[in-house]
Image (cartoon, helix red, strand yellow):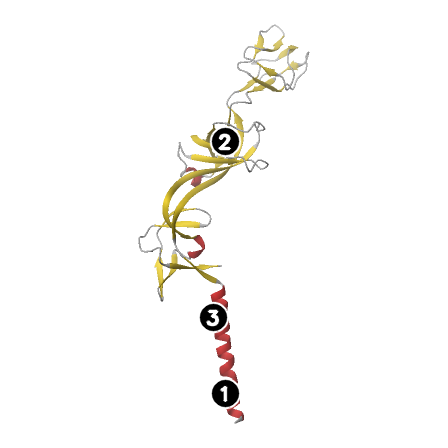
Amino acid sequence: MKKKYLLIIPAIIVVSVVLFKWNQNKKSYELVKPKIGPITEVIYGLGTVESFHKFNFKPGVGKTLNEIYVQEGDKVSKGTKLLRFEDGPTVISPFPGTVLSIPFHMGENVFADRTVITVEDLEKLYIESKLDQVASLRVKKGMKAKISFENLRNEKIEGEVTTLYPSEGQFIAKVEVKKFPPEILPGMTADVAIEIATKEKALIIPVKAISNKMITLVRGNEKIKHETKLGIMDQEWVEEISGEIKESDQVLVKK
């Protein structure tokens, strides 16, 4: 009788371990149905606000600065007198803007090619977004972009990629915006999301369902391993374009 009990106890332990593992495995996964819905794939970049019109005056030869007619922060019109050098013509503003910098004083000698005054148009702005090579190969002129600033997350700012060009080992997407909030100034940074693909009615499944290009389908009482063929992807969902998955199926998703 004692031997019989000894045989039963290990059997109970084995069954308990199997049931425990099965329950744990069950808890770590869930079944999710594919769905038809909109999906948009975006590429993210860090953007900097730039002005369309920027004027930096640098003398071609060293000269003495005789007159300064404006101060930093002054708004100027096209043709406003800015400064004058000894034995030289008066420098005027080529467009309406704001004086941002005058790093010299009257009477100082200015060396050649040193910036004496900076004027920028603070009304007509755009975004320069830096991209890596992989991202730049997918971005095209005319793509839509959404811009957000750290303290203005509720502001919906939309733009469009107008130019893509290389600069010092990086790739720059120029994004033009119809209207910026009045608080925005050149030099400010923003998060830029460029929409590279979008579809209104796509069959989508959770990204977490995919492992090594495979998913586990549950169709009725049957489990099926299926190699995926993917389309547009966002952070949570991905389009499945193989044509083998039905809306009535379920996919196994790791929690």
Q: Residue furthest top?
A: 87
Q: Which mark is residue 7?
A: 1
Label 3 to label 1: alpha-carbon separation: 23 Å
Q: Nearer the viewer, residue 174 or 17?
A: 17
| Residue type (three-letter) at the residue carrying disc 3 | Trp
| Residue type (three-letter) at the residue carrying disc 2 | Glu
Report which residue position mark 2 lands on. 128
> Residue at horizontal 47%, vertical 66%?
26
Report which residue position mark 3 lands on. 22
Q: Where 54 sits versus 253, above or below?
A: above
> Residue at horizontal 57%, vertical 31%?
188
Asked whether the beta carbons under mark 1 and mark 2 sit within 8 Å of each other, the answer is no
Hey, which quadrant is residue 56 in on the image? top right
Q: Secondary structure at mark 2?
A: strand
Q: Is residue 163 visible?
A: no
Q: Secondary structure at mark 1?
A: helix
